Image (cartoon, rainbow, N blue to C red):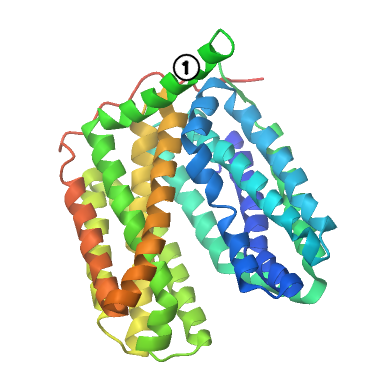
Amino acid sequence: MLRIRDYRFLASGQLLSSLGDWFLLLAVPYYVLELTGSAMASGFSLAAGTVPALVLGPLAGALVDRWNRLRVMIAADLVRMVAVSLMLWVDSPEEVWLIYVALVLESSLSQLFNPASAALLPQLVGREGDLHAANSLSALIAGSIRLVGGPLGGAVYGVLGFTAVVAIDTISYACSALCLTMIRYRPRTTACRSTGTGRGQVRTLAAEIRDGVTQIRHSPWLAALAAAGTLFAIATSAVNVGLIPYVDQVLHASPQILGLLFGAFGAGFLLGVPLSRALARRFADRTVLVGSLTALAVTFAATFNTPVIGWSAALFLTIGAPMVCFAITSGTFVARHTPDAMLGRASATNGFLQAAASLSGMVAGSLLSEALGIVTTMNLCCVTVALAAGTILLMPRRQPPIPEDVSLGEAA
């Protein structure tokens, strides 16, 4: 994959900006807690980034399909750079609101960046085998950052302070924008633009958003995949909420053990990347999707019904692989089988569904853990993942045709 020049710059930009984001993941809540002494205020800093995904997701997808996707990504990086830099001015409890503003702005621009990146990728590498390889490499980058980004950011925060962490994230966005400007790809055709002003523009934009939803709803493949992805997000979010009380109340283990379990999960995530590529070469996407979700349901059941620390460490290693296999295969399937003119909206719609599902899963996981107990809740998550696997079976066995509307562009 790295032989494709433009993809190298795209991947480098994503690596840099994602690393900076993970630096902030731990530093911001700790800093807010340090300034205010309020756990609620610290929690708000985590929630602030989730709201834009629910409010702006479908709208962002429609705009991405209208505009030049590469320019959208560059502009998003630059605005995010400015937004994050606002945190440099916060040094008292009265100014914490500025952190919330910065996080909302950063997340809002990410709603444009992410579907633009997903829609641009097939134009850079094509829709055939290289697309799966590119998504696999992106997952490998994400998994590596997940392993080192948070702990490294916490270390930088502890040694150099909050200002250094914010400065690193700001610089990472600037470097990402610079990498994107090095991409030579230029579309041969310009994106369609609606005419009119005022209410006419609003109606046209609303129609374009509906078109993106319709594209998924009327495709038996994409509709089944979207439903399965929603169930997957509900289950995994509920599991994430229940992990800390599971380790504390069921395993009776220390926070250090929780860190080791997360490390095992991250290692399994990385192992899942080459496994996904190997499976894609031998089996149809439908088979890989069903198999990965079934394996995840079985692994969840084994993990949360075997309350022994040693076994838990081994089983956590097996959780990440089927999760990443499902994520890579589903993302590749959407990118490969969605017309280019709809790809931004399809990606954003799926992102919106998964964000809503994740929020629902977190709320449901918290309530059910209190009402039914941790282990019962985890077993319900196993059943939900199994239902997701059953939903994939609703996809026709015949692979849908690959659209022929992608322009691979030309060097400028």
**The one of 7 and 64 positioned closer to us in this rendering:** 64
Instruction: Please provide percent x and percent y for residue 359.
Output: 43, 56
Badge 1 amino acid: Arg
Q: Secondary structure at mark 1?
A: helix
* Residue drawn at point x = 79 percent, y = 51 percent: 86
Picture quadrant of residue 71: top right
* Residue drawn at point x = 36 percent, y = 33 percent: 336
**Is 388 situated above or below 379?**
above
**The one of 202 and 387 positioned closer to us in this rendering:** 202
**Is 132 situated above or below 28?**
above
Q: Is 363 displayed left or right of 392 in the figure?
A: right
**The one of 268 and 3 positioned closer to us in this rendering:** 268
Instruction: Please provide percent x and percent y for residue 283.
Output: 23, 47
Picture quadrant of residue 96: bottom right
Q: Is 169 displayed left or right of 43 in the figure?
A: right
* Residue that extends furthest to the bottom in the rendered view of this protein: 252
Neighbourhood count class around disc 1 (C-alpha, 10 Å): few under 14, some 14–19, many 20 upward: few
Residue 174 shows up from this direction: yes
Instruction: Give the quarter of the figure containing the C terminus.
Output: top right
* Residue that extends furthest to the top in the rendered view of this protein: 196
How many numbered badges does the structure rendering display? 1
Instruction: Please provide percent x and percent y for residue 394.
Output: 16, 42
Instruction: Please provide percent x and percent y for residue 264.
Output: 44, 75
Residue 192 shows up from this direction: no
* Residue drawn at point x = 49 percent, y = 38 percent: 57
Residue identifier under label 1: 203
* Residue drawn at point x = 29 percent, y = 79 percent: 373
